[in-house]
Each structure stands twice: as structure tokens, then as C-alpha cells.
Amino acid sequence: MSSLHLVTHPLIDHKMAILRAVDTPSPQFRQTLREMSWLLGFAGMAHLKTRPVSLTTPLEQMQARQLTDPAPCLVSILRAGNGLVQGLLELLPEASVGHLGMARDHDSLEPVDYYSNLPADISERQVILADPMLATGGSAVAAADRLRAAGVSDCVFICLLAAPEGVARFEAAHPDIPIITGALDRQLNDQGYILPGLGDAGDRIYAT
């Protein structure tokens, strides 16, 4: 059974078109990515655990539900993942934030692990791993491997769009981690970029 969850919605289609267009300027790209993170985050956070709490409304006492402790952790695959995590953090301000640096070697197309900063108690938290692109799958798999090594057992991966090659590689390595995405594109090109895709998300976020 596939772990891929393709989130469909007219607003996702509309905003994805803005992100894909080559003439979308970086400020608009960043803002639209932020808005997309809210839409994808709604689906990606559906698994979060809650606990019953007693509270008093202006009219009476009632039983409600709140997130369990400790709060979830949002983990960004640097650097482009920060563009998604910024919006996710607005949805979930209680979350802690971790960072994993995974640079792609342009010759081998494999990830180079260069940085890690995770909460000391991450093994006790639900984790949302974020990166705009699931292309070859190398960085996402390496990041998930690092989380597993840190003791994480409850994780979802959120990306803007994915290529079939990346989905297959990620599912083979981590079949129990759901992939939440707004689009499944056609294929990768020889340089490992998604087609039709939207280019290099990091470059477009930061105008580099």
C-alpha cells in the first residue's frame, strides 16, 4: 500500500500554478509557499495526538482536547525546508524546530550530510519533516534515517511536489512514513530536477 497522500484542492492547484511560473518573483514565491504550507499542513497534521482537558467557556465547563506533551517537532531539510517550516510554525506555534543540512552533490546527485540540530528529546515527539521537493529522494531518505537514529518513531514528510522516482525511493526506505504532497509530477531530468517542476525551490525562495 502506498504511503503517498496527494492533497487535492482548488486553492492548491491555483497556488501551485503561481509557484511553477518562471516569472513569479521571489517575494510572491515566498508568500505563496507560506500559504501552501498551511494547506498541506492541515493534512499533514491530521495524525497529531491530543488529550482531554477540562476548561471553562464564558457559559459553562466542558471537556475539550489539546495536543499532548511534549509538542511536535518541525524538522526542516535545509535550506529550502525553511520556507515550508515557517508557515507550519504559524499553524503550530507550540512546536519545536529542528534543522538537518542535506546538500546535493551535483555529480552523484546523492545527499551530503553537513549539519544537524535537533531537540534533545526528539525521540519523545511526533515529527513533521519538511522539504519543498521530493526529487531523487536522497535528501529525504537521509533525513529520515537521521531521525530514526535519534529515536523518532512517529513522523510524516510534507513536500510541495514529488517525482515518482523520489516517492519510490522514499517508500522503499521508510514505508511507514506518510508522504503528504500537493502534486505528483511526471519524472526527473538527467540533472535530477523534477519535470515539469518549479525549478530550484531554495534559489527561488532566496533569490539566489
Image (cartoon, rainbow, N blue to C red):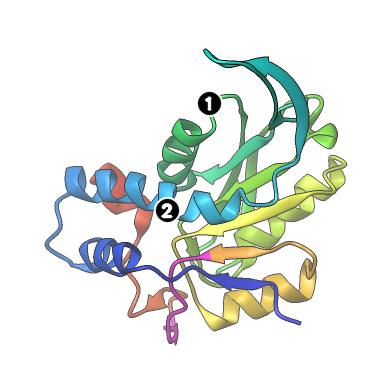
Q: Position of residue 34 (x, y in %)?
A: 35, 44
Q: Is residue 52 magenta?
A: no
Residue occupied by mark 2: 39
Q: Position of residue 131 (x, y in %)?
A: 51, 53
Q: Residue at x 19, y 67 (%)?
A: 21
Q: Residue at x 24, y 68 (%)?
A: 17
Within the image, what quadrant is residue 14 found in? bottom left
Residue occupied by mark 1: 93
Left or right, residue 80 beside residue 93: left
Q: Which residues are magenta?
A: 181-190
Q: Residues within 10 Å of mark 1 (few under 14, many from 20)?
A: few
Q: Position of residue 62 (x, y in %)?
A: 69, 23
Answer yes or no: is residue 79 visible: no
- Tell me which numbered mark, 1 or 2, is placed earlier along the sequence: 2
Q: Residues within 10 Å of mark 2 (few under 14, many from 20)?
A: many
Viewer-closest of 113 and 135: 135
Q: Main secondary structure of the magenta part?
A: loop
Viewer-closest of 168 and 88: 88
Residue 7 lies, with reference to residue 139, above or below; the image says below
Q: Residue furthest front?
A: 59
Gap in angstroms between the C-alphas marked 1 and 2: 16 Å
Residue 78 lies, with reference to residue 190, above or below; the image says above
The amino acid sitting under disc 1 is Pro
Q: Quadrant of the N terminus?
A: bottom right
The amino acid sitting under disc 2 is Leu
Viewer-closest of 150 and 74: 74
Q: Secondary structure at mark 1?
A: loop
Q: Residue at x 44, y 61 (%)?
A: 160
